[in-house]
């Protein structure tokens, strides 16, 4: 198949620098998508300069959508010819239950090909907030409850590694494509792994924030330096654990008072420690991750960031 693009003579054409400005994708990446993966096919001037039509720009936006869902760039070409809109099913509670059971069984069987297919399918079919609320968050809660009784380090670390790679791909491209506020997302010290941080990062990125994810707990006393050097607009802490009394009652409020940006808490810890954090300078965002991330915008607006 020829890679040469053809457009009507009167079609407006844009140089690569303008396309980069419009889409947020830098010119080096645009050239790589063309040369290495054949994802886009701009026209060329007699001197070899690339010119992009509006349908090329639309295609770039579709590429970003797939990358933001965690699809590797090498697999995007096969997906671009699918229909642009996929009707979102409205499964009943029984269907969600069976899908949760299926996902948990796949995770515990360490079946990574099936897990990757399930992950991409869930993010392609459902809005991310629904996929997290109805599938991923309940399954993670179920697994953590099971691991509290009988630890399974292999399954936990395998799931963490899988999600870290998938979410990392999404963050890489999403951070390039948006100019939104930067959220510094960090795990709390008692959380045995980054599962809650990864889900929070996925949701925050979907809402247009740039995300700097730290899946190992950064000491609270280092947060001011981290905020300054990373130019963060907010610190978001996440945990699936209760965390210690000293951390919740003393260290965390003290850290919040020392920062010049808001500090929020989400994940199971927000539910478990709701009463302890209500009157503190820490912003309690809740354990429902889509709702927690939705609460960031008014908080950032109130602090003058937006």
Image (cartoon, rainbow, N blue to C red):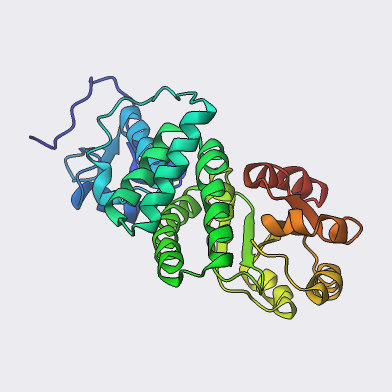
Q: Is residue 278 visible?
A: yes
Relative image position of residue 87 (x, y in whole percent): 42, 22
Q: Residue furthest left?
A: 1
Q: How many marks?
A: 0
Q: Is residue 179 visible?
A: no
Position of 126 with respect to 252 (left or right) is left
Relative image position of residue 175 (x, y in whole percent): 50, 54
Quadrant of the drawing holding the N terminus:
top left
x 19%, y 44%: residue = 38
Residue 90 lies, with reference to residue 214, above or below; the image says above
User: Which one is in front, 55 or 124?
Assistant: 124
Residue 112 lies, with reference to residue 63, above or below; the image says below
x 26%, y 49%: residue = 33
Residue 190, located in which quarter of the rendered image?
A: bottom right
Relative image position of residue 120 (x, y in whole percent): 37, 43
Position of 49 with respect to 252 (left or right) is left
User: Which one is in front, 12 or 188?
Assistant: 188
x 54%, y 68%: residue = 193
Q: Residue furthest right?
A: 279
x 64%, y 73%: residue = 229
Residue 157 lies, with reference to residue 7, above or below; the image says below
């Amino acid at each position: 198949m020829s890679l040469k693009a053809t457009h009507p003579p009167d079609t407006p054409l844009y140089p690569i620098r303008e396309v980069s400005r419009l889409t947020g994708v830098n010119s080096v990446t645009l050239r790589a998508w063309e040369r290495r993966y054949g994802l886009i096919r701009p026209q060329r001037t007699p001197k070899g300069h690339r010119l992009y039509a509006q349908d090329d720009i639309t295609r770039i936006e579709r590429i970003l959508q797939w990358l933001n869902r965690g699809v590797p760039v090498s697999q995007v070409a096969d997906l671009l010819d699918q229909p642009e809109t996929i009707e979102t099913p409205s499964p009943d509670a029984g269907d969600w239950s069976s899908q949760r059971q299926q996902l948990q069984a796949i995770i515990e069987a360490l079946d990574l090909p099936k897990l990757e297919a399930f992950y991409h399918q869930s993010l392609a079919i459902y809005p991310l907030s629904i996929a997290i609320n109805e599938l991923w968050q309940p399954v993670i809660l179920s697994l953590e409850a099971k691991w509290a009784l009988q630890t399974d380090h292999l399954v936990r670390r395998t799931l963490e590694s899988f999600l870290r790679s998938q979410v990392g791909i999404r963050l890489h491209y999403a951070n390039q494509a948006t100019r939104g506020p930067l959220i510094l997302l960090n795990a709390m010290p008692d959380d045995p792994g980054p599962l809650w941080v990864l889900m929070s990062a996925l949701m925050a990125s979907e809402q247009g924030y740039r995300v700097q994810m730290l899946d190992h707990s950064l000491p609270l006393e280092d947060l001011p330096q981290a905020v300054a050097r990373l130019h963060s607009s907010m610190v978001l802490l996440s945990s699936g654990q209760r965390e210690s009394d000293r951390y919740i009652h003393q260290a965390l409020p003290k850290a919040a008072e020392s920062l010049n940006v808001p500090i929020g808490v989400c994940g199971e810890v927000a539910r478990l420690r709701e009463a302890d954090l209500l009157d503190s300078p820490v912003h309690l965002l809740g354990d429902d991750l889509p709702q927690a991330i939705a609460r960031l915008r008014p908080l950032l607006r109130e602090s003058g960031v937006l």
